[in-house]
Image (tube, helix red, strand yellow):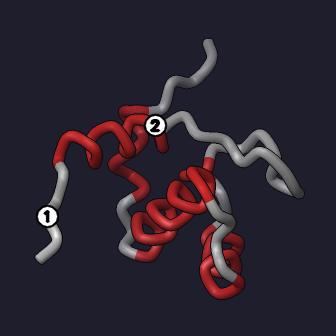
């Protein structure tokens, strides 16, 4: 049976709040702000290996469950 590591989940959520797309049309954009169809496309094609793929997978789950609003207080906006 798999266990849920709440400490790791907490760190991933905080990291995702500032994680930016490193390439492509949406380079520099926060993953959580990527258009949902783009994230769904990545899910269908397969996420890249490594941390980016893991972060995109978490983003996919958040977006498809309508939970993006939970990130608004965590995102540091310039200003």
The quarter holding residue 1 reads bottom left
Q: Where does label 1 land, which residue?
A: 3
Q: Nearer the viewer, residue 55 or 67?
A: 55
Relative to 27, 51 lies left or right: left
Between residue 3 and residue 42, name the one nearer to us.
Answer: 3
Q: Residue drawn 44% across and 62% down?
A: 58
Query: Any mark on residue 58, and which?
Result: none
Q: Is residue 56 above or below residue 27?
A: below
Q: Element at badge 1?
A: loop
**Labels 1 & 2 near each other (Cβ < 8 A):** no
Horizontal arrangement in the rendering, residue 65 relative to residue 49 (left or right): left
Q: Residues within 10 Å of mark 2 (few under 14, many from 20)?
A: few
Residue positioned most to the bottom: 44
Q: Taking 40 as reference, is 30 above or below it? A: above
Residue 14: quadrant of the picture: top left
Q: Which residue is mark 2?
A: 15
Q: Nearer the viewer, mark 1 or mark 2?
A: 1
Q: Secondary structure at mark 2?
A: helix
Q: Quadrant of residue 71?
A: top left
Q: Position of residue 75 (x, y in %)?
A: 48, 32
Labels 1 and 2: the sequence-earlier one: 1
Q: Residue at x 68, y 75 (%)?
A: 42
């Amino acid at each position: 049976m798999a266990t849920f590591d709440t400490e790791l989940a907490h760190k991933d959520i905080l990291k995702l709040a500032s994680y930016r797309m490193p390439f492509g049309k949406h380079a520099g954009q926060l993953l959580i702000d990527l258009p949902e169809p783009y994230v769904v496309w990545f899910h269908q094609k397969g996420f890249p290996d490594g941390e980016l793929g893991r972060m995109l997978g978490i983003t996919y789950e958040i977006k498809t469950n309508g939970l993006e609003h939970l990130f608004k207080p965590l995102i540091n906006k310039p200003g």
